Amino acid sequence: MTRNSSETVLILGANSDVAKECIRKYLKKGYTIFAASRSTEELKVIAKELDPSGKQIRVLYFDATAFEGHQEFYNKLPAKPTIVVYAAGFLVANEEALQNWQEAFRMMNVNYSGAVSILNIVATDSANTRLKRIIGISSLSGVRGRKSNFIYGSTKSAFTQYLGGLRQYLASRKVVVNVIVSGYIRTKINAGLDLPETLLMEPEFVAEKIVEAGSGFVIVPGMKWKAIYQVLKRLPENLVAKLP
């Protein structure tokens, strides 16, 4: 179904591989898109390719860790959003995060604190009667604490819990909040990691689940990952301890 271009999608962290696919899909549905990221040059190229007229895609600068500028960023949006997608993410290996506080702190700020900062602003703008949906991209790494990635996982777990509460907070305004609890995706954030090829999902596949999100809270893309999600949730602690 094609929407009127007056309906807008704000994508935060729009330079991620999944977010770029979301831009393509939302554009086909007729939305006006505000693509926001620290890295704007590549986004400008994509915007020019997909929207030569420049009428439906606006590229904006957004730094998830620059909390003091989030209110001004929101105030200056060309229009208030109908849909908000938080796709910003940052990952460092667990051993590095254990030994390098700055990198661990950056991961916390991009994956969680920055999300809370900007989404609080979005959620408390009761004057924006256009708002219909907020979608956050989380991870199965946040389902249970595991020794191989518990610092990254903790940021995603916190984000998922925040979105769960935000969903309840916004229910009276009939704003839907979804969390995408994703497994491994073939993206630049995972480049170089030794991941099982049979479990890797393509960004386009995950983007489809985001753009077609329904009314349910947790969305786990892929049948294999749905099964893994259910197992992880129910696995006894002594067996979780044996996981990598």
Image (cartoon, helix red, strand yellow):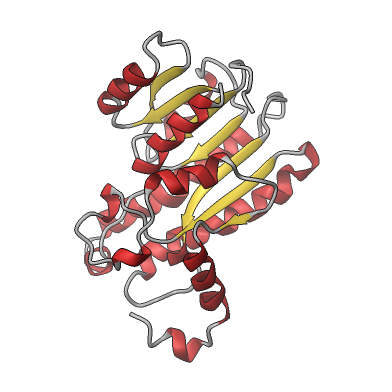
> Residue 224 location in percent, x, y?
48, 67
> Residue 146 location in percent, x, y?
39, 76
User: Is 82 placed above or below 159 here?
Assistant: above
Q: State which quadrant residue 150 falls in.
A: bottom left
Task: Classify the position of the N terminus by image quarter.
Answer: top right
Residue that appears at 70% across and 47% down: 215
Count of all numbered marks drawn on residues in the image? 0
Which residue is at the far left? 192
User: Is 210 placed above or below 196 here?
Assistant: above
Task: Classify the position of the C terminus by image quarter.
Answer: bottom left
> Residue 34 location in percent, x, y?
47, 24
Q: State which quadrant residue 20 falls in.
A: top left
Residue 108 located left or right of residue 143? left
Between residues 186 and 190, which one lies in front from this camera angle? 186
> Residue 69 location in percent, x, y?
43, 29
Residue 91 located left or right of residue 239? left
Q: State which quadrant residue 68 falls in.
A: top left
Residue that appears at 50% across and 17% down: 76
Residue that appears at 19% across and 58% down: 192
Using the rendered image of the protein, determine whether residue 38 is visible from the camera's viewpoint.
Answer: yes
User: Is 23 placed above or below 182 here?
Assistant: above
Using the rendered image of the protein, determine whether residue 71 is visible from the camera's viewpoint.
Answer: no
Which residue is at the far top? 53
Which residue is at the far bottom? 238
Residue that appears at 49% across and 59% down: 222
